[in-house]
Image (tube, grey):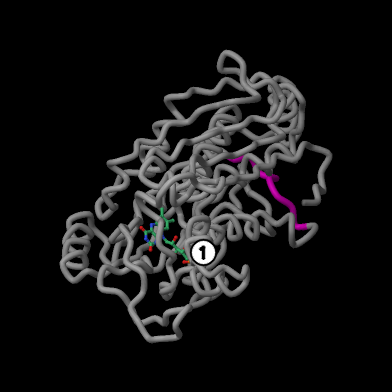
Amino acid sequence: MAVYACGVALEVKTAGESHGPALVAIVSGLPAGLLLDRDAIDHDLNRRQQGYGRSPRQRLEQDRVEVVAGLRHGCTLGSPLALVIRNRDHENWAWGMSPWPPEGDATGKGTTPVTLPRPGHADLAGALKYGHDDTRNTLERASARQTAVQVAAGAVAKALLREIGVEVSARVLEVGGEASEDEWQRATDAARADRDTLGGVIEVVAEGAPPGLGSYAEKETRLDARLAAALMGIQAVKGVEIGEGFALARRRGSEAHDEVGDDRRRETNRAGGIEGGVTNGEPVVVRAAMKPLPTLMRPLRSVDLESGEPGEALVERSDVQAVEALAVVAEAAVAWELARAAREKFGGDALIDFLGAHAAYLERIRWRHNG
Ligand SMILES: Cc1cc2nc3c(=O)[nH]c(=O)nc-3n(C[C@H](O)[C@H](O)[C@H](O)COP(=O)(O)O)c2cc1C
């Protein structure tokens, strides 16, 4: 990935299958001297597992982060940070998901090949693309279980952002087309009774970002494009809005923009804090639309990839809806992208250098931080 500023590239690479031994993330580009709080990371992992409509797996497994590199006594070393989350359910899949050829008779889960792809999942396209006879070889990685380790990386990004006064939070706006919590629960219960699933809409807000994160210079550097890609990178997200997004298309210009006051602040924030792909100092506001989850307990029509016979798609333990979980994952994704933009802008090998560059910049633009 190209970096167009003189700062540092914050990068993450993840690995891990849904029922494999563990999920892993390697984060590089963090400054040395950043204090991390294990409880804060575990708190976000726990938030991701909560929510009305989640499957029993979330109760079975309580995710906990392990750090195996890049940290000493809670403080980053400036070397790559390696995060691990064990899949506690793996013990039930030890034969089926064994990384090495398993010994002994087939036992536990995942021992019979999955040949009935689920519409709306990566199953069919993945099996064709990679030449898998068993679509488990696709679905184990395509599954949103992988978002756990993204949330852990996002919690690290939030710790860095907090150092420069940026707070990221998310909330659910709609579930199954309903806009209040009581109605979400009713809609979820009704969908569960019908063995069906729901989607919804979430919103992420980042307060305190200075003007100047991202750049209009190239399409890859535009923060709006990067946030859209970060959110679309989450399973089941099918639409993203920045600020008032689609509603702006139906208004006149006089009702669509945010006039600049003499203190350079805005009374409205229709742009969602980004103009020309660059933060403008107002809160960054993004929304994401999640489609109804594709694993239905009343399965959709499919075809057996082995026999060619019509059949019903795979039924596997699954959520009725996961919109609250999406909010937590989206919060992590937005925090990650903002932290990446901040590392590009302010650089620094040590946290103190990063903070110094941030303070000097605010001074130069005479920007009063009110995050
Ligand atoms: C937090 C979260 C939890 C999810 N849980 C499920 C689930 O339990 N069952 C399911 O079928 N899909 C679930 N999904 C969605 C699928 O992973 C996703 O629809 C699938 O991988 C296909 O990708 P696509 O929808 O982006 O095309 C979940 C997504 C997220 C973000």
Residue displayed at 18% across by 71% down: 194
**In the image: residue 357, left or right of residue 106:** right
Kind of residue at badge 1:
Val
Above-or-below relation of 108 to 368: below
Instruction: Check disc 1 and report its element: helix, strand or loop.
Output: strand
Question: Front-most of 332 and 145?
Answer: 145
Q: Position of residue 33 (x, y in %)?
A: 66, 19
Question: Front-most of 121 and 277?
Answer: 121
Residue displayed at 35% across by 81% down: 311
- Please identify the quarter of the rendering in which residue 276 is found: bottom right
Residue displayed at 34% across by 56% down: 322
- Please identify the quarter of the rendering in which residue 39 is found: top left
Q: Which residue is mark 1?
A: 240
Residue 371 appears in the picture as rendered: no
Which quadrant of the picture is home to ligand 1? bottom left
Residue 130 colored magenta? no
Q: Position of residue 81 (x, y in %)?
A: 64, 30
Q: Position of residue 266 (x, y in %)?
A: 55, 50
**Segment tinted magenta in the rendering:** 209-216
Residue 215 colored magenta? yes
Residue displayed at 22% across by 62% down: 188
Residue that lies at the very extreme toward the top in this rendered image: 73
Residue that lies at the very extreme toward the front in this rendered image: 104
Above-or-below relation of 96 to 63: below
Specify the principal SS of the magenta part. loop
Question: Front-most of 44 and 178?
Answer: 44
Q: Position of residue 17 (x, y in %)?
A: 51, 50
Question: Front-most of 271 and 74?
Answer: 74
- Is the residue marked by circle 1 packed among few (<14), some (14-19), or many (20+) residues within 10 Å? many
Above-or-below relation of 279 to 209: below
